Image: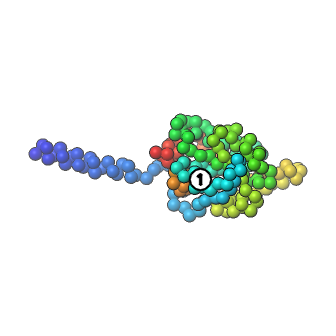
Amino acid sequence: MKKLLAFLAFTLLLAGCDKINTRPPSFQNTDMTGVDYARDFALTDHNGKPRTLADFKGKVVVMFFGYTQCPDVCPTTMAEMANVVKELGPAGKDVQVLFVTVDPERDTRELLAQYVPAFNPTFLGLYGDAAATAKVGKEFKVFYAKVPGSTPGSYSMDHTAGSYVFDRNGKLRLFLRHGKGAAAIVPDLRQLLS
């Protein structure tokens, strides 16, 4: 009888174990799982290589839209992502950060090649012409607009201040709002990396 009770208890315990592993993740950031946009892009990286989301399959991808002359949101976001990758330790090698310029007029390949890797050598800058940028912006529902400056070349760009996160299979999973800090991002990325 004791053996039967022990066997039943063990069986019930095992039956519950599969529930633990199939629970959906509990994210601190905005869960975007299942949305029907931000499916893909076709841009060129700062090394001159054409890129799509499929190129990064097997990695967790963090995609941010900004521009190199941005005075605040862009550099703080990129520095924050550099801290996130560092805090992830060895798992950070499986995170690919992509910086997509919304200012193709000024953000040349050469400028992106200097700016983006300065935050982390593995980060990639992506660019396209005005039409390609507009297409990606529309697909990702990203707002961006030129704000005139005192001279024609001194304009700024208003833009969406957040990042998209894709899982290892290229599925959109999260939206990271600007300014939440690395402490709110690292646990979510750890879940997607595991």
Q: Looking at the figure, which quarter contains the N terminus?
A: top left
Position of residue 151 measured from the top left corner of the image (x, y, whole percent)? 89, 50
Residue to which mark 1 is pinned: 55
> Is residue 105 visible to the viewer in this orientation of the structure?
yes
Q: Residue at x 51, y 57 (%)?
A: 33
Q: Is residue 87 above or below residue 174?
A: above
Residue at 63% x, 41% y is 122
* Residue type of the residue flagged with mark 1: Asp
Counting labels gives 1
Closest to the observer, 143 or 121: 121
> Residue at 62% across / 46% down in the picture?
97
Report the front residue among 91 and 16: 91
- Colour pattern: rainbow
Location of residue 166 in the rendering, given as x and y in whole percent from the top left corner: 55, 52
Q: Residue furthest right?
A: 151
When the figure is inspected, residue 158 is found, relative to residue 187, above or below; the finding is: below
Q: Tag 1, which secondary structure?
A: helix
- Dot 1 alpha-carbon crowd within 10 angstroms: few under 14, some 14 to 19, many 20 or more: few
Q: Is residue 24 left or right of residue 56?
A: left
Q: Residue at x 52, y 36 (%)?
A: 90
**Residue 28 visible in image:** no
Q: In x, y percent, where is residue 160? A: 68, 54
